[in-house]
Image (cartoon, helix red, strand yellow):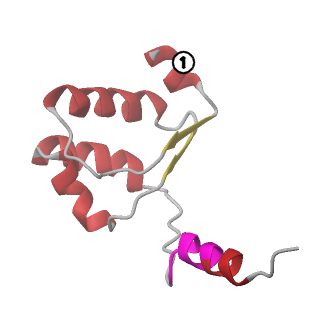
Amino acid sequence: MFRRTTKAPLLILKNWGPDRLTATQRRDCMETVEGRYGRGLTMITSQLPIKAWHDVIGQPTFADAILDRIVYNAYRLELEGQSMRKTISKIDYEMPQT
């Protein structure tokens, strides 16, 4: 699985950060981002600001190393405004039924 993950042209990490990483997850994350660095695209979605990612990773040395590889050369898109789920559900609710 590690080889497939590092060789994939695009890796998507969805909902990054709802829970802190365990020691095993930190090591796996480090090995994955190290193996992918400069080889493929990685997309990360999160509701947490990047400044909170250090706490999610947990261990400062790992956090610095992982974030250095993730954030360096990254394109950041920070969305603002109300959740699309709320907007879509409001539209669905207001639409007349046919």
Q: Quadrant of the C terminus?
A: bottom right
Please determine whether, in this image, residue 19 is positioned above or below residue 87: above
Residue picked out by circle 1: 4
- Is 88 contained in the magenta span? yes
**How far across and how far down the image is residue 4, in percent?**
54, 18
Q: Looking at this view, name the residue that lies furthest to the right.
A: 98
Q: Nearer the viewer, residue 35 or 43?
A: 43
The part of the image, by quadrant, that contains residue 51 is: bottom left
Q: Nearer the viewer, residue 35 or 56?
A: 56
Residue in the image at 32% along x and 33% along y: 29
Residue in the image at 66% along x and 78% along y: 93
**How far across and how far down the image is residue 25, in percent?**
25, 30
Q: Looking at this view, name the residue that lies furthest to the front.
A: 98
Q: Label 1: state its secondary structure.
A: helix
**How far across and how far down the image is residue 7, in percent?**
57, 23
Q: Which SS does the magenta portion mostly show?
A: helix
Q: Amino acid at mark 1?
A: Arg
**How far across and how far down the image is residue 28, in percent?**
30, 26
Q: Residues within 10 Å of mark 1 (few under 14, many from 20)?
A: few
Residue 41 shown left or right of residue 15 in the figure: right
Please determine whether, in this image, residue 7 is positioned above or below residue 40: above
Residue in the image at 21% along x and 39% along y: 21
Residue in the image at 23% along x and 47% along y: 19
Q: Which residues are magenta?
A: 82-89
